[in-house]
Image: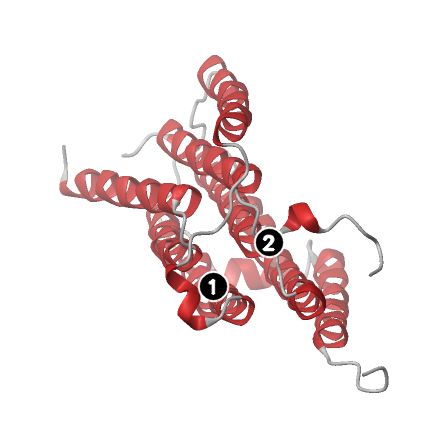
Amino acid sequence: MIQLESYLIISAIVFVLGIFTILYKKNAVGILMGVELILNSVNLNFIAFARYIDTYINGQLVAIFIIILAASEAAVALAIILNMYRDRRSVDVTKMDEMKN
Amino acid sequence: MEATQVLFWFIAVVTILSAGIVAFSSKLIHSAFALLATLVGFAAFYVYLGADFLAVAQIMIYVGGILILIIFGVMMTHRIYDTSKRTAHNSLILSLLGGAAMAAILGMIIFRSPWTATVFKTLKPTTSMIGTSILTNYLLPFEVISVLLLGALVGAVYLARREEDEE
């Protein structure tokens, strides 16, 4: 039997790597990958709690909604990134300092 | 140690290593393909946690959908010959500090709280339970998220479309 803490530690490590990715990368697509890492680690926590603490599967249901949100977020974010690239030929977020070009 | 535990820790190491590649790789396309290993690793964890439906959903939605979108985004925003080109980064030290602060907070929470597994469930299929719950207790979130999904779909198409009347 694998302990609950194992899952919590793995998910914390991946969460921290996701935060680091968001801080470290300048490329907007790279930042999106960091967000996906974070969403996945949160999902792992929810499902682990659904297995070990909850008497029902509420954690899994929350995880389903998170997956749906992640999918719609990725679609909208990539649409914005493509627009950004079309306007400026660059996806460097540190250079995006104007509201309108 | 049992074989399942050995396999679990092997998957854990692979998942964390590939998440590290996502974070530290200077080539974006390498990050994208390392993300594939991370997502599949998470699907394996869901199998270990008895979430059969979610493991399959993870593979279908993340690996089959979101990851393809991300790789598509990488290909569209870089010329394909540029995959060897290094991408610019922010300050490594400041980013590591931010990550370390987050790690300290999470570590404190995890190691100071008493985690006791209060229920010991037998593994059983979850798909019918999920279906029943979505149409009973979780009906309102389900409806709201379907509207949100439609909104995101229309919004993404609208944003990504070329504005022909302006060009």
Which residue sits at x=48%, y=62%? B62
The chain under label 1 reads: B
Q: Pick whichever, A57 or B28, lies toward us.
A: B28
Q: Quadrant of residue B140?
A: bottom right
Extreme-top residue of the structure? B112
Q: Is residue B55 visible?
A: yes
Figure check: B145 above or below A7: below
Check disc 2 and report its element: helix, strand or loop: helix
The residue where tag 1 is placed is B67
Which chain is mark 2 on?
A: A
Residue for point 53% across, 30% down: B95
Q: How many neighbours does mark 2 have within 10 angstroms: few (below 14), some (14-19), or many (20 or more)? A: many
Please identify the quarter of the rendering in which residue A5 is found: top left
Q: Residue at x 34, y 51 (%)?
A: B41
Residue B77 shows which numbered tag? none
* Amino acid on which disc 1 is placed: Leu
Q: Is residue B134 left or right of residue B123?
A: right
Are circles 1 and 2 on residues that touch, CB within 8 Å?
no
Question: Quadrant location of the N terminus of chain B?
Answer: top left
How far apart, in angstroms, are the residues tagged by discs 1 and 2? 15 Å
- Residue B69: x %, y % from top left: 53, 68
x then y, percent, for residue B146: 72, 67
Between B146 and A19, the one nearer to me in the picture: A19
Inspect the image, locate mark 2, and give the three-letter code of the amino acid beneath it.
Answer: Ala
- The residue positioned farthest toward the bottom in the image shown: B165
Residue A28: numbered disc? 2
Q: Secondary structure at mark 1?
A: helix
Q: Position of residue A73 (x, y in %)?
A: 65, 59
Looking at the image, residue B9 sits to the left or right of residue B128; the answer is: left
Of B145 and B101, nearer the camera is: B101
